[in-house]
Image: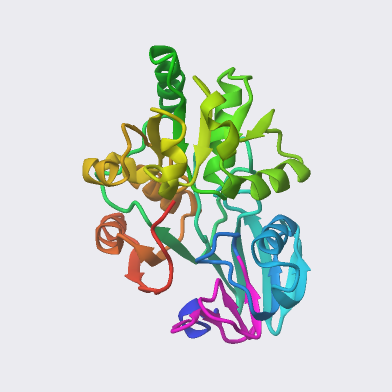
Amino acid sequence: MALHPQHWLKAMPGGLYCEPGGFFIDPSRPVDRAIVTHGHGDHARSGHGKVAATAETLAIMGVRYGEGFARESQALGYGERLTMGDVTIMLEPAGHILGSAQVVLEHGGCRAVVSGDYKRRFDPTCPPFTPVKCDVFITEATFGLPVFRHPPDKGEIAKVLHARELFPDRSVLIGAYSLGKCQRVIALLRRAGYDRPIYLHGAHQALCDLYVALGVQLGALLPATVADTKKITNEIVLCPPSAIGEIWSRRMGDPVPAVASGWMRIRARARQARAELPLIISDHCDWDELLQTVGDVDAPEVWVTHGREEALIHAIEQTGRRARALSLVGYEDEE
């Protein structure tokens, strides 16, 4: 008789724990053994004893935390199998950022898939999400409300290029998260035909360099240093969202402030972010994509880790599937 994942996967204060394997997935505190889905700081923390993740995620952790981020690390390729205790582990692409992975767990005749953060949109910087049939699908719900329906990325990038044409003496300053979003926006601009150098805030440089070193083509990138900001006119500049409105950005004269985030669907969020040009570009699924994924993996039961849980659980139950909230803490909504 198959052993249901509810008997061997537990929501603990430190995160999701696999008892027969003796490891956590994306733990929120240092643990002895961890599987890490991707390199964002709310999922990939330093101080663990042993970490298993994709080679790209381990490289990202090395840049962010230094080479001693864990006592021991093990790189896993997509589709490669690893056994811990009585559990077989496999990583499959999550489509969230470079190196992001779903964690496929097999034990006692059952399969559970932990999605980590994921998206279903095309992204030139990482492999696309791969649906994996399973008994229990464990998903995030960052944008788990019907109001969140992301428009096509192509149209949002066209807004940037149009703003540059409309204001020839102003640069477009795009606030974008330094890992994943920044590189994806650059890659989408390149696919739209923009071949001029793109300027970077210093906080973006190291991870862009890593992406390039790992084979992601981003084109010509230049530093947007304070000494040169007055010379940067009618260009595209990327910075952390928090840098918009700071002294650094004001030294560029009068840029068009933009922010790339799924939260730009909410006008109050756009005003709070000082976004004159809100760009709805997300590295997470929108409402329709979450429901599409639940159908694609065809799991009879779905667990929701964090985000807008109640609406998504209700919608899943309407399809005849069982669903429940894990309400894991320590995971952020920033993107």
Picture layout, residue 170 above or below residue 279: above
- The answer to whether 279 appears left or right of 71 in the picture is left
Q: Quadrant of the N terminus?
A: bottom right
Q: Residue at x 38, y 66 (%)?
A: 306
In the foreground, 172 or 301: 172
Percent x, y for residue 226?
A: 56, 39
Percent x, y for residue 194?
A: 58, 19
Which residue appears farthest toward the front when viewing the image? Answer: 227
- The answer to whether 130 appears left or right of 305 in the picture is right
Say how many tags the image has.
0
Asked whether residue 224 is in view, the answer is no
Asked whether residue 87 is in view, the answer is yes
- The answer to whether 13 appears left or right of 187 in the picture is left
Picture layout, residue 307 above or below residue 149: below
Percent x, y for residue 76?
A: 75, 63
In the foreground, 178 or 44: 178
Question: In the rendered image, which quarter is residue 47 located in?
Answer: bottom right
Magenta stretch bounds: 10-36
Question: In the rendered image, which quarter is residue 12 located in?
Answer: bottom left
Percent x, y for residue 262?
A: 37, 43
Picture layout, residue 286 above or below residue 142: above
User: Does 23 appear in magenta?
Assistant: yes
